[in-house]
Image: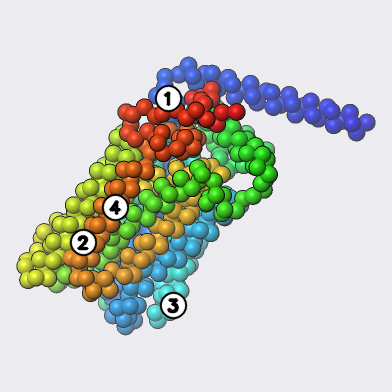
Amino acid sequence: MRRGYVERDSMAASDKDVREDEETQEMISSMEMEHPSKRGGSLEWLAISSVMTVSIFAGLLGYDIGVMAGALLPMSRDLSFTSTQEEIAVGCLNFVSAAGAIGGGTMYNKLGAVKCVKIAVVLYAVGMLVIAASHSFAMVFLGRVIVGLGVGLGFAICPQYIAEISPPAWRGVLVSCFEISINLGLCGGYLANLVFIDVSDSPRWRGLMLLPLLPTALIYVINVPKLPESPRWLLKTPGNEALARDVLVRTCGETAAGPALADIKQVIAQQNADEENQGDRGKKGWSQLFEEPIARRALLIGAGTAFFQQANGSEAAVYYVPQVLKAAGVESERDQLGAAAVVGLCKTVFITVGQFSVDRYGRRVMLLSSIASVTAALWLLAYCLGAAQAGGSAAGLTLFALCFFMASFSLGMGPVTWVVTSEIFPLRVRSKGVAFSMAANRITSGTVAMTFLSLSRWLGAGGAFSLFACVSASHFVFTYFLLPETRGKTLEEIEAALGAGSTRYQRFVNDEEVASPSYEANRSGVPIRAP
């Protein structure tokens, strides 16, 4: 009797699988009849609203950068900080956020994106409350540690989440919203400093710390509960196919949902088969990121791009705008903060241009042209600050160089970095790869922020920016030889291109990508490993 039930259950399951396969095939066939431009999917409201919600973490970090540029001055006077304590108060958040990012890589696999977002929001709010209530350097440090954990977790989760719910044709624009949010937050921080400029020291910096908590609470209560889970995370667990299909339809459109679902399932099935053949089923640790050839190649590109984004001194240019302008001869604190707001506004305006160009001109063109301009701006900034130290008057030219630097950064290096790190990693290691890249980015940022004042005392402000210019030139070489063009590709296509090897990369948008003999296209045009 039991055997009969088992046979009937097996037949029912088989019939169900056949029906699902037939439905998928019908959707793929209908998709192939559509114009090729529709294969990238349509931009649905759920994708837009979800991106806007999770980008809050980028805005919070941007606000922190902008507001600390002005709040550090009254905070230091009120709590009697030394210069070393100032550097630690600024830079420690980035180091701690690196730890939060590493933890986020593991938490995402276990909890999913939505729960991680909720945890990150709570950590940020608690940390800002601790800072606002501080009466010593130790309490400020503790608050910055808690905020850093929340920011790091958000940085590890959000770009990957945006990439996984975005239609391929719109992925560059949507992931770039992360960088736009950083710049909007940066401008908000600079403007808040100007608004509070006439308030006495203690209520001034404490009020600046409390200011972002109200919008954060509203987003947590109203928007976060509406977030859909990533369809790729859902499909890792059996029984979630219907839910994953629904999310794909509501974020990418009906036309793209079926083929996308089939491609994701095929990639997961291939990965499971590889694990069985290698005898390492259940092996989910960080070692995958360093042992598998495709993962190592992706790690070099993703983590390297994230590292160079901060190694050129961009964090110093925004955290220490008042100090840089003071070195150029601007003595008034009001003028310093006003100039900082101009720099932040310039950065924000140009990031919108970069956002809508990344999917038009491609990742490589935007990034390489941006790096070249940033390098030139850094040499100009180094010259201006060197001339000021030699007794020349270079305040106006220094402000222009800062704006030129920020504009160049925002056109490519800002948005493209997040796009590359969120899309370059294979599915099985994506959460860990993005987390590792974000950790590298935050550690580099913290190192720059915590050493810039000391570096300026040692080399002079001009010498410090000359060093950053040399690093930026190295970034150009790295990008030219290692970064493939990924515009318009699905995440599964990018994974297949990495498997083909660097000699077969598509270098620019109009280039023909060389096919690998070990890969073939599936029915929706996605390269997969040949049997």
Residue 350 percent coordinates (x, y):
24, 46
Residue at 28% across, 60% down? 313
Q: Is residue 204 visible?
A: no
Q: 272 or 470, which is in the foreground?
A: 470
- CA gap between label 1 and label 4 equals 39 Å
Task: Give the residue drawn at x 21%, y 71%.
Answer: 459
Q: Which residue of the protein is positioned furthest toward the right in this rendering?
A: 1
Instruction: Count neighbours of disc 1 (C-alpha within 10 A) and say few if under 14, some if 14 to 19, many if 20 or more.
Output: some
Residue located 33% across and 48% down the image = 478
Q: CA distance from mark 4 to mark 3?
A: 39 Å
The disc label shown at residue 466, or none: 2
Of circles 1 and 3, which is in front?
Answer: 1
Q: Label 4: state its secondary structure.
A: helix
Residue 40 seen in this snapshot: yes
Look at the image and tell me in which quarter the N terminus lies.
top right
C-alpha separation, residue under disc 1 versus residue under disc 3: 54 Å
Q: Return the disc, 2 or 4, that comes first in the chain's sequence.
A: 2
Which residue position is annotated with label 4?
Answer: 474
| Residue 21 position in % (x across, y down) | 64, 24
> Of the residues under marks 1 and 3, which one precedes in the sequence?
1
State the residue position of label 3: 139
Q: Tell me: 7 left or right of 91.
A: right
Q: Depth-wise, is mark 3 or mark 2 nearer the camera? A: 2
Q: What kind of residue is marked 2? A: Ser
